[in-house]
Image: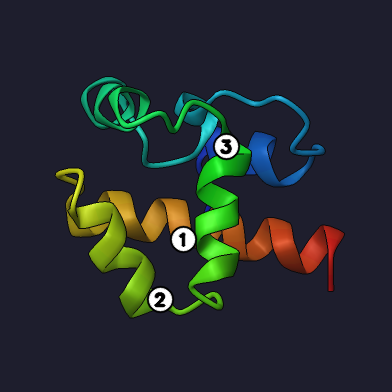
Amino acid sequence: MSGSSRQHIDFVNSPMKQKRVSQLPGIGFVLGGKLIDAGITRAYHVFGKFLVLDKDRIAFYEWLRGFGADDGQCTACFNALDEWCKRYLD
């Protein structure tokens, strides 16, 4: 696994379904609030952006930084989405 936090493990080991954006690793209260204010309320919204950006790490980081994310948050979120994608879609 690319990450070892409990949140990362829980996220990648279960289907996306209706997970809240705050259930994504790296997305805390403040960043989650900014995403919600922009209408991004579910993890699958962020995952959709991840796919639209063709799983490009740099582009995804730039997009998430637009909401105030730091490098650690970007890394945690990208790694979880990437691993989830490999587990369920690849």
Q: Of helix, strand and loop, which one carries label 1?
A: helix
Which residue is more in the foreground, 70 or 5?
Answer: 70
Q: Which residue is mark 2?
A: 57
10 Å neighbourhood of mark 3: few (<14), some, or many (≥20)?
Answer: many
Residue 62 figure quarter = bottom left
Choose mark 1 or mark 3, whichever is in front: 3
Residue that sits furthest to the front in the current view: 39
Could you tell me residue 45's position as x and y percent?
55, 42
**Which residue is disc 3 drawn over?**
43
- For the rendered model, the colour scheme is rainbow
Q: Against 27, is 83 above or below?
A: below
Amino acid, disc 2:
Arg
Q: Tell me the kind of residue under disc 1.
A: Phe
Q: Can you say whether 34 is above or below 71 in the image?
A: above
Residue at the spot of label 1: 78
Residue at horizontal 50 percent and vertical 37 percent from the top: 24
Q: Residue 32 or 3: which is nearer the viewer?
A: 32
Can the viewer see residue 23?
A: yes
Q: Residues within 10 Å of mark 1 (few under 14, many from 20)?
A: many
Occupied quadrant, residue 61: bottom left
Which circle's residue, 2 or 3, is located before the other in the chain? 3
Q: Kindly tell me whether residue 4 is visible in this rendering.
A: no
**Quadrant location of the N terminus in the rendered image:** bottom right
Q: Which mark is residue 86?
A: none
Q: Position of residue 46 (x, y in %)?
A: 50, 47
Residue at screen point 55% across, 68% down = 52
Amino acid at circle 3: Ala
**Which residue is rendered at x = 18% and y = 52% of the image?**
66
How far across and down, in percent of the image, does residue 43 sit?
57, 37
